[in-house]
Image (cartoon, helix red, strand yellow):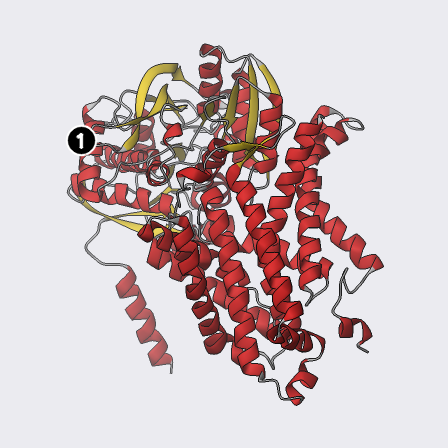
Amino acid sequence: MLKKIVAAAALTAAVSSPASADIKIGFVTTLTTPAAVVGRDMRDAVELALEHIGGRMGPEAVEVVYGDDEFNAQKGKQATERLLLRDDVDLVAGYIWSNVLLASAPVVLSAGKLLISANAGPAPLAGRRCHENFFNISWQNDQTPMALGELLNREAIRSLYIVAPNYVAGQNMVAGVERVFAGEVVGKDMTVWPSQRDWSAELSKIKAAGPEGVFMFYPGPAGPAFVKQYEQAGLIDAIPLFSVYTFDSISLPLFQEAGIDAVLGSKMTQFWAPDLRNDQNQKFVAAFRKKYGRYPSFYAAQSYDSMFFIKSAVEAVGGDVQDVDGMRSALRKAEFPSVRGQFRMGSNHFPVQNFYERTVVEDADGNWTTSVGPVVLEDHQDPYASQCEMGG
Amino acid sequence: MDYVLLIEQLLNGFQLGIILFLMAAGLTLVFGIMDLVNLAHGSLFMIGAFVGGTLTLATGSLMLGAVLMVPAMFAIGVLVETIALRTLYRRSHLDQVLATFGLILFFNEATRLIWGPEGLAVPLPDFLEGTVALGAGITYPLYRVVIIVIGILVALGLYLLVARTRFGMLVRAGASNRVMAGALGVNIPVLFSLVFGIGAVLAGLAGLIITPITQAAIGMGEDVLILAFVVIVIGGIGSVRGAFVAALLTGIIDTMGRSFLDVILLLFLSPNAAESAGPALSSMLIYILMAGILFFRPQGLFPPRSATAAP
């Protein structure tokens, strides 16, 4: 009996740790549940990045081990623990959801490993709970809606109606817009998340309020549903719709399939767009489209960046990933070709970067995508950086 | 608060009620007649949306898709009943809950494997797009009017089926006293399969007609299922009439809460408190309604006759 157990344990160990890789990176994302569509984009981008760097960072061969958070903070934490304990990864990256990241971060940081968020940017980790071993390679949650507030001011929108889901990120997005928007907010509905998919009551209220613009935030599949109903209620030609994180390469094909051409021309803000002009981005977007037959989303862009970001640090320490101090100071420099072009790492380890206007357009082949416009916020740092007092 | 908004919100509540009724009608029959707690009823809602949506995209017509979906859903319902649920009738409700919860996981993953994680968008035919003027300054999305009309027609058809046909008599007999109906020679297994099949068709229809509005997504049925359980508890388990009244009541109260509660709270609270209390309270409203109704009528509004007389 004991022999059997030992043999089984040995077998598991042999299976889970192939001897070939010198560096192991844990990557936590959502691979099941309806949100897996986001996780798929991230994994595809990571795989593409590995292909582009030939599976090597400096002298070392790299292996990425994926963890599935199942769209759930507790499961995400367990997946992180498994990566650290069972797979013995050298550092951990990924994380779509702010709540998953907040639950998992203490596990990685207390193990003394580096943690790199490829999407989630919750306020605590940018401010009071910032950590020397935590880096973010996307953005802080408040920044994109702040840019949108500025865009609304530029478009001379004086009265705004806000519809967003009633959970942490939804509240952050609304707070970000309200922080910058100079006009009057004539109405605000925070809806049940994630279950509410029918906004008939809210749309009737919008119609009655008659604002000059509507701001909405519905990530994932809820976004297309909202816009569809917005159109069916006869509002789309009457009141311009502004959004963040709602129209991306994941949702736009669904809009196109459903023939909701009213979304063409809708405006948003973001740090990146598929047609942002720089060499790294053009290479990334072209290769991604060639390999997977679709446009990459911003999730994919960030994930692609995260691999090059890590690579720059591994090369700086000559492949000795145990040298966390050396890795950290290389990461702080952020010297790697980013798909967003030039940017720098802020004092709280969140990017200080430009935010652009983005518009939904049809490309030359008839695919719906987004096109980058003028800079809305230049070299923007998140509002929490001043609260971060980093030891070391 | 002008009357145009009020009437629009009433229509919105009515339309939500219709969807809830289509879900609850099948659920209440299955629970009332077969004494089976079927958590997987929400999965049938989802399957209806995906199967019906696929048929719609294949045929290019929403109506053709809906017509073809009816036999498909009936077959799926009968299949599920025969394969998975038949063995559960004699088991306790807890076993049924466990097993049908397993079915939810199975159907969600199966849907993900077949259609992928991104869901399905079903376009609305052009002639159903846009809004209609209902007079007095009220404009309302045409498709939502169509949903209300379809729902009323189905309710009427179901009422005639249950109240006026021989099959309906057997169903009512089954709901009142299953053992006695069986003893009098009713073929219970066939009756159960038929009832379950009809429930599946109704749930699938609800899923399909809401899809052009909300899109089909994995797990879309679970949230509706909870509301549908509230509806059948309020309406009285086993009663189609109860389900109809309770569904409309639930739909209208839920919608009214979402639309006007924050305005009403503003009369008593500060804007910040009203803003955060409004959504919280409005999502509790229907459960408060359920608790209130159960306090005065523990069997629901329209319990089947024998249920009240049962010891």
Depth check: A71 or B171 in front? B171
The image shows residue B89 at horizontal and vertical percentages of 59, 79
Residue found 51% across the figure and 13% down from its top: A157
Q: Which quadrant holds the C terminus of chain A?
A: top left
> Looking at the image, which residue sits at the far right?
B296
The image quadrant of residue B274 is top right
Chain under disc 1: A
Depth check: B209 or A385 in front? B209
The image quadrant of residue A144 is top left
The amino acid type, in three-letter code, at marker 1 is Lys
Depth check: B166 or A380 in front? B166
| Relative horizontal placement of residue B122, taking residue A20 as reference (left or right) | right
Does residue A88 appear in the picture of this structure?
Answer: no
SS for callout 1: helix
Number of numbered tags placed on the structure image: 1
Give above or below for A350 relative to B153.
Answer: above
The image shows residue A370 at horizontal and vertical percentages of 32, 27
Please rate how many residues cluster around mark 1, counting C-alpha atoms within 10 Å: few if below 14, some from 14 to 19, many from 20.
few
| Relative horizontal placement of residue B86, taking residue B281 as reference (left or right) | left
Residue found 71% across the figure and 31% down from its top: B262
| Relative horizontal placement of residue A290, taking residue A12 as reference (left or right) | left
